[in-house]
């Protein structure tokens, strides 16, 4: 089923099976991932014995072209939960994230932060064992403690790209101490693997559920990366050159700004900014410790999605959504650049929801975040944030 739409009949079959024994495994998924009848029985036993959570296991590869679920298990689980209601924790598969195992909780359920990471780390090649381990971790409640015992380089490699999907902001101002950026209205972070068909929207209750679940994951990734940067700074020291000392100060400044964002109820647009700042700070730290010659300059990242990794190429982008759109030259990662040069909009643009529709972040007024493309158009992102904060204080006076 990995290359097909998940039909209404299949949804009904999944819901019936979940109401029966709490486990539904797509036959093609079972073949691809070597899940035997004995493995399925072990998963069913784990679900039946779960004490702390109402577990539901749905193992299927959601195709990126699926019109309803867009390659996301978070979307599928939210849809299923919207129909079933109640408190439940869904375990599934999201091939667009690391780890691929996905754990989504709805209602009054135990904390699932770090659960998928630990299960994947302990059983990287066995999906059935991962699922069974999820049940044990939820009942024991010790996943986070176990995860932080894993060496930091291994933790970071698993959590660097969790496939963040959605989050919600009510109110609208994220403050970076003196570095302030205004965020107005309700916004949602959504990582897209394919464009949503024209006119298609998930039910509002499903979107709300997705936001609540994925906001935790976005924040977890930010907390993890900023903490990793702080640990690296605390255990290292710069080289002796003037350039190394300057880069070290940049690392400290970026770390302080990112921590300041996360010290409060930051809006998702600001949390993305914290991630960008943390990654720039880590680049500055590495340059300082390695003694890279010359002054440190922030790396250029992808304008379409500031969390994309890898080198960038300049492309000419014409948005096409408004009559006054003009061509702009922007840096893009390899995948986004290839899409633009083929005449397509990239699949994985950073989006937020404004009202009832999704809007690319650069079409929203997110202060320095949107104006600078999260620093892709202006390398001195900290300077832009400081200027915005000073401007707001001056206008207020």
Image (tube, rainbow, N blue to C red):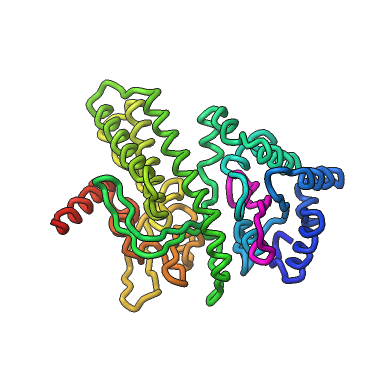
Q: Position of residue 390 (x, y in %)?
A: 18, 51
Q: Name the one closer to the observer, 271 or 320.
A: 271
Total tally of numbered discs in the picture: 0
Q: Is residue 120 above or below residue 219?
A: above
Quadrant of image for the C terminus: bottom left
User: What is the x, y in percent for residue 105?
Assistant: 61, 52
Residue at x 51% of width, y 31% of height:
153
Q: Quadrant of the N terminus?
A: bottom right
Q: From the top left corner, tell me how far across and down residue 369 is, in percent.
A: 32, 55
Position of 310 with respect to 391 (left or right) is: right
Query: Camera-side residue: 178 or 229?
Result: 178
Pick the front one: 252 or 348: 252
90 magenta-colored: yes
Part of the protein shown in magenta: 81-104
Left or right of residue 302: residue 367: left
Q: Is residue 15 above or below residue 290?
A: below
Confirm whether residue 191 shows in the render: no
**Residue 20 lies in magenta, yes or no?**
no
Q: Is residue 141 left or right of residue 185?
A: right
The picture places residue 31, in percent across and down from the top left corner, at 80, 51
Q: Quadrant of residue 128?
A: top right
Residue 391 can be seen, yes or no:
yes
Q: Residue furthest right?
A: 37
| 300 in relation to 19, above or below | above
For image coordinates 66% across by 62% down, the residue present is 85
Residue shown at the point (57%, 35%) measured from the top left: 144
């Amino acid at each position: 089923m990995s290359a097909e739409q998940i039909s209404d009949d299949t949804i009904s079959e999944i819901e019936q099976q979940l109401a029966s024994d709490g486990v539904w495994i797509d036959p093609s998924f079972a073949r691809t991932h070597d899940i035997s009848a004995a493995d399925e029985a072990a998963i069913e036993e784990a679900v039946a014995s779960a004490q702390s959570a109402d577990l539901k296991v749905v193992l299927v590869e959601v195709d990126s072209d699926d019109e309803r679920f867009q390659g996301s298990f978070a979307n599928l689980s939210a849809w299923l939960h919207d129909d079933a209601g109640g408190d439940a924790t869904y375990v599934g598969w999201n091939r667009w994230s690391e780890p691929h195992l996905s754990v989504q909780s709805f209602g009054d359920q135990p904390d699932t932060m770090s659960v998928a990471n630990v299960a994947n780390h302990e059983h990287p090649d066995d999906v059935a064992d991962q699922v069974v381990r999820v049940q044990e971790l939820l009942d024991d409640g010790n996943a986070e403690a176990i995860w932080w015992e894993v060496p930091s380089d291994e933790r970071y490699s698993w959590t660097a790209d969790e496939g963040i999907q959605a989050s919600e902001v009510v109110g609208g101002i994220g403050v970076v101490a003196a570095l302030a950026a205004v965020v107005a209205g309700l916004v949602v972070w959504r990582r897209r693997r394919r464009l949503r068909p024209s006119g298609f929207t998930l039910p509002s209750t499903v979107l709300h559920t997705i936001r609540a679940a994925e906001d935790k994951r976005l924040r977890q990734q930010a907390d993890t990366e900023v903490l990793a940067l702080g640990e690296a700074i605390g255990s290292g020291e710069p080289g002796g050159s003037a350039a190394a000392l300057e880069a070290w100060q940049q690392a400290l400044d970026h770390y302080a700004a990112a921590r300041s964002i996360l010290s409060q109820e930051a809006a998702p647009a600001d949390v993305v900014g914290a991630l960008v700042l943390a990654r720039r700070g880590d680049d500055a730290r590495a340059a300082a410790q390695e003694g890279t010659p010359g002054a440190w300059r922030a790396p250029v990242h992808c304008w379409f999605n500031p969390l994309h990794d890898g080198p960038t190429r300049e492309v000419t982008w014409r948005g096409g959504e408004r009559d006054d759109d003009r061509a702009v030259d922007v840096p893009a990662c390899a995948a986004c650049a290839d899409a633009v040069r083929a005449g397509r909009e990239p699949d994985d643009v950073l989006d937020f929801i404004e009202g009832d529709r999704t809007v690319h972040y650069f079409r929203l007024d997110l202060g320095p975040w949107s104006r600078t493309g999260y620093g892709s158009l202006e390398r001195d992102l900290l300077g832009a944030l400081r200027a915005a904060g000073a401007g707001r204080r001056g206008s207020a006076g």
